[in-house]
Image (cartoon, rainbow, N blue to C red):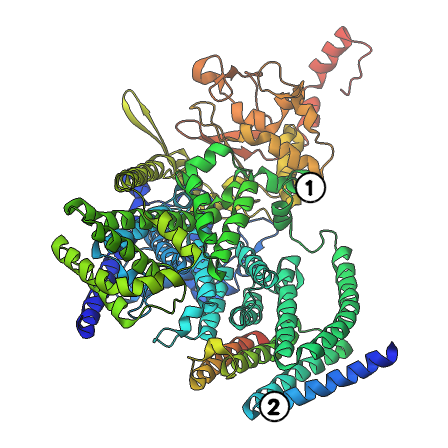
Amino acid sequence: MVDPSEAKGEGSLRKAFGGVLGFFILLLIGTLAFSIRLFSVIKYESVIHEFDPYFNYRVTQFLTKNGIYDFWNWFDDRTWYPLGRVIGGTVYPGLTLTAGSIWWLLNNLNIPLSVETVCVFTAPIFSANAAWATYLLTKAPAHLFEVKGTGAGLTAAVLLAMVILFLLVFLLISDNQNVPSYISRSVAGSYDNEAVAIFALIFTFYLYIKSSDLKNYTQTLNTGSLFYATLNALSYFYMVCSWGGYTFIINLIPMHVLLCIVTGRYSSRLYIAYAPLVVFGTLLASLVPVVGFNAVMTSEHFASFLVFIIIHVVALVYYIKGILSPKMFKVAMTLIVTIGIAVCGAVLAILIALVASSPTKGWSGRSLSLLDPTYASKYIPIIASVSEHQPPTWPSYFMDINVLAFLVPAGIVACFLPLSDASSFVILYITTSVYFSGVMVRLMLVLAPAACIMSGIALSEAFDVFTRSIKFQLPKLFETPPSDVWQLIGDTNNGTQDELAKVDSKIPTEKSETTVKERPSKKNRKKEKEILEKGKEIKEKGKENVEKVSDKRQNAKKLLVLPLEASAVAILLLIILGAFYVVHCVWAAAEAYSAPSIVLTSHSHDGLHVFDDFREAYAWLKHNTDVDDKVASWWDYGYQTTAMANRTVIVDNNTWNNTHIATVGTAMSSPEKPAWEIFNSLDVKYVLVVFGGFVGYPSDDINKFLWMVRIGGGVFPHIREPDYLRDGQYRIDAQATPTMLNCLMYKLSYYRFVETDGKGFDRVRRTEIGKKHFKLTHFEEVFTTHHWMVRIYKLKPPKNMTRGKSKKKINPKTRTKISYQKNRNKNPWQ
Amino acid sequence: MAKSSSSDAQALIRSLRSAYAATPTNLKIIDLYVVYAITTAVIQIVYMGIVGSFPFNSFLSGILSCVGTAVLAVCLRIQVNKENKEFKDLSPERAFADFVLCNLVLHLVIMNFLG
């Protein structure tokens, strides 16, 4: 007979140890997530990367300098000249507010970090938070760690097995959070919306599952689901503040609710989890100025309202079913169905009429391009031209999620085995995110957490099976088993299968529970003795167990115990797999995703070359031009120019005004004089071009030029793309079309280029250029950076119109003499 | 056919009434509150139809506050109802506290949005 208090003491000690261990593992995970993203700071410097982060950095600077009221009402006149931009109303404030408040907090604690430092390190901090949120989210569908008092699940396992399980699941989730696709958008220095938004996404999903979960009521901590539903709504608010991708949440959750209703899993918990979220969520989303009334008027939100109505109908139906007798209920149903269909038809007709009246059926351009991948290339060339919006290639999947790519299907299967609300949610999440990541490579970011969760589940189930197999067969190794011990072990398996199968069994009495719990000890002898003892007790009950054991459990018993050697080898192989994954992630983080594209490096035989041309050009602009001078360039460089050079630009990365961008594109595609006139009408003083032909930098303006033509041609029809192509091919050598050779972009890129090597060999296009010696008539070159990567030109002031006539008047005699002698018929005034 | 369906309808209404009369008083109070909230929302919509929706944010916040309290009251009713086996571990005081807290948050947001 086992002393129950002693067993309980051991159980709680084990639980406590497990809890502490879990806490330290989570801490390690956070540190790992943070440090793997620091490669760019180590290899280059603590600088902000890419283009979009510069805008966010500039906005954060403004916020910290001028306070929140000015930020909320800020009208920026230094971009999109002469239109300006209402920043308060068109920016997603979540990221800047987060970084601003971190900076403010630290400064008030007398830790004087600069705004730039805070901005650079915001992303790694939030990636650590995202890793912890993923752990929380995976707990529910994986059915792990059910702390249900003394009765079941993992508390029955050996300490070692528990350690392995904890360790591996946590490490896997953590390593999984370092999946390269997520790293790419959250390295130190990548100060973009997604850094914070992914954390908000995962946390919102976690709170949604928590608020619809049954377990909350069996815990002794008072967790009520309405409380979590409110928290869920607040977390959704944070997501809406942070990223335009919040529409994913507000469509996925209704889809999941609909799925639950349709598969018959409706319950009142679902109502409590969903209905407040819709009301709160719509309200909170309308609070954010960017979204405003779009929260109730665009099609992206209609799904949530539709499902809101549906869930009320279903709730009412269930309620009536509960209070009526079955016969009456049938009558009610027929009545309701006839009336209901009529009403529904009317409402639907109104809705369709409303929606169809708008040309895009109520959806925004970006959402439409997600639903129909060919939409953008047909109608909105700007969206199609952004490289992040292209569909990903197959190798990029493997590069980005590596090993997880084939663990995900295993995880999906594991989720089905006991299908619950939470696991159906995760399955839906991964399916939709796989589809959307196939449309836009940028959305691989949304796929990353889903893939991590799925593979975490798969791996933990796998390890579960293997470690239990090993554990059950270890005694076999150390003792020569007599036949009754075999039987005992068989009964042991049977007994623990009672615990393992998550079916409420009517059998486990206190005795069997306490004896099972008593088993974990490190000495095999003790184990064997206990097994013998327990075996005797269970033998008596074993028969009843066996009778009441369902077929499923018998099969489960057979499946769950694999041969010892196979399990050991399998565990080893899985660990090696994990090691490969870690190596790949670290390599990807270090080599592929840590480049701040503002500074480029290359390795050559005489060491490391650093190309800092961008910052050189912006610094020149800052020091050598007037504060009010306007700079025109292609929209890629707008944010960087305003942030670093502090000059007004014509178009920038926000790309909200297609016509303005088309104007600049037309100017770049026209010959010098019309281009000069366009730029002069916009008050432009300087034109900035990026040219990679001298060093072989492939993302320069000549490579982007066709997009300028397409976008410009979309608004100004005299720019036709075929004019710039010779036989459908884009060339800049001697075979190029005259339109191409005369356009402004060609001239500004290749002006004096022939002086570098005598032949004008373009290292990116790998040919010699077509027109080598030419002069610029309306522009003058004012600055070219060290490696010819950025070239700045100034618009020449308009020619003095009287020059020609005064010339004639000054030398009338010589001129008429010559003209009279040479060409009698020539017009003397010409 | 019509007669049988109308008599069916009457029988239905009668049985609904008798079944509903059996519900405990506190649940009936909550149901009354829900009906009141929905009525207020309908009144607001009719008013908007007459007057026009100019400060749209005010209209929206008014409607959503009514719908919001109605939804929260329904959630309270679900949690307090003794026939709901899923919630038998939840004390009614805790459910009411949740209700109050969520209403507080709702009205804070409403006041901000009212404009």
Return the residue nearer the eye: A500 or A800.
A500
Q: Chain of mark 2?
A: B
Tag shown at residue A379: 1
The residue carrying pointer 1 sits among few (fewer than 14), some (14 to 19) or many (20 or more) residues within 10 Å by Cα, namely: few
* Mark closer to the observer (1, 2): 2
Q: Position of residue A557 (x, y in %)?
A: 36, 52
Residue located beneath label 2 in the image: B22
Residue, x 13% and y 58% (percent of image)?
A526
Q: In this view of the protein, can residue B15 be seen by the observer?
A: yes
Residue, x 46% and y 73% (percent of image)?
A225
Q: Amino acid at mark 1?
A: Tyr
Q: Chain of mark 1?
A: A
* A69 to the left or right of A663: left
Q: Position of residue A506 (x, y in %)?
A: 38, 69
**A597, above or below A727, in the image:** below
- Give the farthest residue toward the right: B2
